[in-house]
Amino acid sequence: MEKLTSLISETNALLDPSYTPERKERKPRAAGTGTGGRRGRPRKEATAE
């Protein structure tokens, strides 16, 4: 019963209009050196017409 009470109180805290979620800390992207592989589908060859 205590678990249910704690879950309800947490839910009420989330539904409170003044609630602001915490900002996640994200790692900065690695500097692109341009040596990485190309993403996506490869282009069609011009000779395949």
Image (cartoon, rainbow, N blue to C red):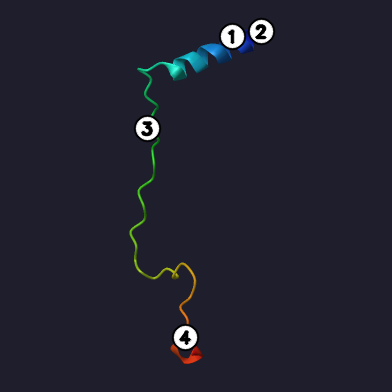
Amino acid type at circle 3 is Arg
Measure the C-alpha gap from mark 1 to mark 2.
6 Å
Mark earlier in primary sequence (2, 3): 2
Amino acid type, callout 2:
Met
As measured in the structure, the alpha-carbon distance from the residue carrying label 3 to the one carrying label 4 is 46 Å
Which label sits in the foreground, 3 or 4? 4
Residue designated by label 4: 45
Compared with 45, 12 (above or below) is above
Which numbered marker is on residue 46?
Answer: none
Query: Residue 23, how many percent across, how many down?
Result: 37, 32
Identify the residue under disc 2.
Answer: 1
Disc 3 element: loop
Lower position in the chain sequence, tag 3 or tag 4? 3
Q: Residues within 10 Å of mark 4 (few under 14, many from 20)?
A: few
Give whichever of 27, 9 is nearer the camera. Answer: 9
4 vs 2, front mark:
4
Instruction: Indicate the position of residue 40 as horizontal and vertical percent values.
Output: 47, 68
Q: Are marks 4 and 2 in contact (CB under 8 Å)?
A: no
Q: Residue furthest front?
A: 49
Q: What residue would you read off at disc 3?
A: 23
Q: Return the residue at label 1.
A: 5
Q: Residue at x 57, y 15 (%)?
A: 7
- Residue at disc 2, secondary structure: loop
Cα–Cα span, label 2 and label 3: 32 Å
Q: Nearer the viewer, residue 20 or 48?
A: 48
